[in-house]
Image (cartoon, grey):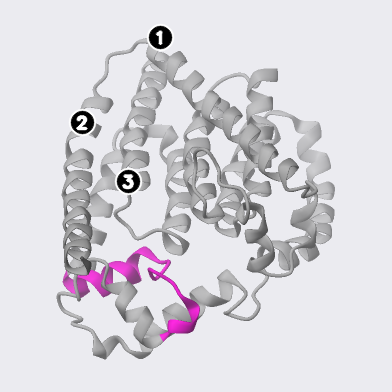
Amino acid sequence: FFFYFFFFFFLNLYIKFIVNLSFLLVVPSFLEKLPENPEIKDKFKIYLELIIILSSIQIIYVYVVQNIPFTYFLNIQSSIDAYAITRTVEPIFGHSNKNIWASKLFLIQLIYVYFILNGKIKIREFLILFLSISNIVLLLSRTAQIAMVIPLVYVFYKKIFSRNSYIRFFSLFLVPLLLIGLIGLVTDVILRVGDPSEDGGASRIALWKAFFENFNQTNYLVGNGLYSSYQFLMEYVPHLVNTNMHNFIINIAMETGILGVIIYILFFVFLFKSLLLNLGKYKIEFLLVFILPVVIILSLQYLGYDNDIVLYFALLFLIKNFYMKDLEKNRE
């Protein structure tokens, strides 16, 4: 029984790897060359909004049914406290692990930021922005919360700060005061690092430390094979009970070795260059808002070849298509 289980498990893993790679090589070229069609853009925006709204309803349900206050995030002392939100209630969609749920939702919400940055912020957009922030705060995933900071700061800069001289003036005094006031909150709630057995941040550091201390025990040239991180962690840090390294570079190094890391990084370099090609004045915006936050997520959460990441990068080519059409309109 166990032989068949592991055989089909690894077979499924390799199929997933091949399908994801094929998807990422084929679909983006199609999305990037889609002809201009306002209907596609509008429908895509509505689909994203529906996912964000339904996710909000589900998160509220999870809190209410367990009688958890919405200010719970202010009282968290460890990751064990944070996991309380999904301890007794299974979400209908998303994930039973609140970190994975938050990361998946964050990627969807990040795509929606395009419509906020490149259109008028009316009540509809403001509501979705508010729900997006609330979703990530209430899901209690520090990885998603940290990644959310960059696009939020950029939205504030582009839509408010750079357009209003009065706000620029007051921001010079107001922002430093807010930052001073938020230091305690950020340190205690988001950047807290405690005991590795109770805190996700500390456990990640322990996993990475174990990898570097025992790197010579791995087949460091070509790696130990897909999903070998689990066996490695069970051998060297079994008390932390983790299935992967929670860092895409370290995870790829463990599974495919130095050779795999070089190929993987080169793949990403060419992918990012392709995404930024011909974006003109939008290049920095695209890099800061759509690429940098995902690198943060990958560095703390994902394996590196997950379905969510592949789909996100494919959709980025659709967002690039929208930007290219915006550039053409600006030239006319």
* Left-right relation of 260 to 324: left
Residue 86 appears at what percent x and percent y? 61, 53
Q: What element carries label 3?
A: helix
Task: Calculate the distance from the C-alpha at mark 1 to the C-alpha at mark 2.
Answer: 20 Å
Location of residue 87 with respect to 291 vertically, above or below: below
Stretch in magenta: 237-259
The residue type indicated by label 2 comes to: Ser
Determine the secondary structure under disc 1.
helix
Asked which quadrant contains residue 315, the reply is top left
Circle 2 residue:
29
Q: Earlier in the sequence, mark 3 or mark 1?
A: 1
* Magenta-colored stretch includes residue 283: no
Q: Residue 316 location, x and y as percent?
A: 36, 35
Give, as a three-letter code, the residue at label 3: Asn
The residues tagged by marks 3 and 1 sit, at their Cα atoms, a distance apart of 27 Å
Q: Main secondary structure of the magenta part?
A: helix
Image coordinates of residue 96 in percent, x first then y, are 52, 51
| First of labels 2, 3 by sequence position | 2
Q: Which residue lies furthest to the front in this view?
A: 1
Circle 2 residues within 10 Å: few <14, some 14–19, many ≥20 = few
| Mark linked to residue 39 | 1
The nearer-to-camera label among 2 and 3 is 3
Task: State how far apart marks 2 and 3 are (Cα).
Answer: 18 Å
Name which residue lies at 47% across and 63% down: 300
Nearer to us in this view, 267 or 50: 50
On-image quarter of the N terminus = bottom left
According to the picture, the residue beneath numbered tag 3 turns out to be 307
Q: Pointer 1: residues within 10 angstroms few (<14), some, or many (20+)?
A: few
Q: In this view, does 107 lie to the left or right of 229?
A: right
Circle nearer the N terminus (1, 2): 2
Residues at circles 2 and 3 in contact by the CB criterion of under 8 Å: no
